[in-house]
Image: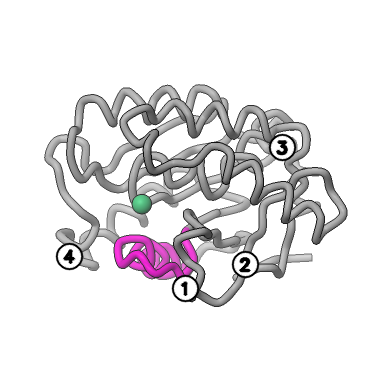
């Protein structure tokens, strides 16, 4: 990742199953990379329900992170598991071809939400011929208590924790289940572990040094 940061900011591509997943799981690092000059693209796969409102919220969240937003299936409500894997990989292939990312961030295969692990699978397939760094996140760590913990890589998000919380809060329809305080608490706990004030934890799937 150091190399990424040295290369004119680089290009970052993040895959999320649903609106709000990326803000919750990786919002601090995405905002930080954008602030450091990277071109950040968010690819959100599906909107399960309440499409118009959730689309507006996704746009607001991406704006706060200073990222470009693509919603792959915005014309019809669906879940990731409704989409055939070969079709999903083809759509991911196209985005990877367009963005030519230096760093990709995606869901962890260990995420207990089935849609999230499907996005991991499609990401790994779509990157089979693309040399880039690859990190994975748990979008709702407090709901993944049984999952294998992720602590291979910590990103310092001290400068962007407030932006991350604002970007999560942009998803007003999800406010009841998105604990803003718990997101801040988790970032503080990850910071304690890693020596930063606030941090996000990632699983390292591929890093070029
Ligand atoms: Zn989700």
Q: Which mark is residue 143?
A: none
Label 2 sits on residue: 203
Q: Residue at x 61, y 52 (%)?
A: 103
| Distance CA(mark 2)–CA(mark 3) | 22 Å
Magenta segment boundaries in residue numbering: 107-127
Q: Earlier in the sequence, mark 4 or mark 3?
A: 3
Query: Would you call the spot at circle 1 few (<14 residues within 10 Å), some (14-19), or many (20 or more)?
Result: many
The residue labelled by disc 1 is 110
Q: Are marks 3 and 1 in contact (CB under 8 Å)?
A: no
Which of the image's four quarters has the N terminus?
Answer: bottom right
Dot 2 falls on a residue whose secondary structure is: strand
- The answer to whether 94 appears left or right of 156 in the picture is left
Check the image and report above or below for 19 versus 209.
Answer: above
Q: Is mark 3 within 8 Å of ligand 1?
A: no
First in residue order: circle 1 vs circle 2: 1
Residue 204 location in percent, x, y? 65, 68
Check if mark 4's residue and mark 1's residue have beta carbons within 8 Å: no
Q: Nearer the viewer, residue 127 or 138?
A: 138
Front: mark 4 or 3: 4
Q: Is residue 112 left or right of residue 27?
A: left
Q: Which residue is mark 4?
A: 84
Please determine whether, in this image, residue 151 is positioned above or below residue 187.
below
**Is residue 118 covered in magenta?**
yes
Expressed as whole percent of the image width and height from the top left, the position of residue 44 reads 36, 43
């Amino acid at each position: 990742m150091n190399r990424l940061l040295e290369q004119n900011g680089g290009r970052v591509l993040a895959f999320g199953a649903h609106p709000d997943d990326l803000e919750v799981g990786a919002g601090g690092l995405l905002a930080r990379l954008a602030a450091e000059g990277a071109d950040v693209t968010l690819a959100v796969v599906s909107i399960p329900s309440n499409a118009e409102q959730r689309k507006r919220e996704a746009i607001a969240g991406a704006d706060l992170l200073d990222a470009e937003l693509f919603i792959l299936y915005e014309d019809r409500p669906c879940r990731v598991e409704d989409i055939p894997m070969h079709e999903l990989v083809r759509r991911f292939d196209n985005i990877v071809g367009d963005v030519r990312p230096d760093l990709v961030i995606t869901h962890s295969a260990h995420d207990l939400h089935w849609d999230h692990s499907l996005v991991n699978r499609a990401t790994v397939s779509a990157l089979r011929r693309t040399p880039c760094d690859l990190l994975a996140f748990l979008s709702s760590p407090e709901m993944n208590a049984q999952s294998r913990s992720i602590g291979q890589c910590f990103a310092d998000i001290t400068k962007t924790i407030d932006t991350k919380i604002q970007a999560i809060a942009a998803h007003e329809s999800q406010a009841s289940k998105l604990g803003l305080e718990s997101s801040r608490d988790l970032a503080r706990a990850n910071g304690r572990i890693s020596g930063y004030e606030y941090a996000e934890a990632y699983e390292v799937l591929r890093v070029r040094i």
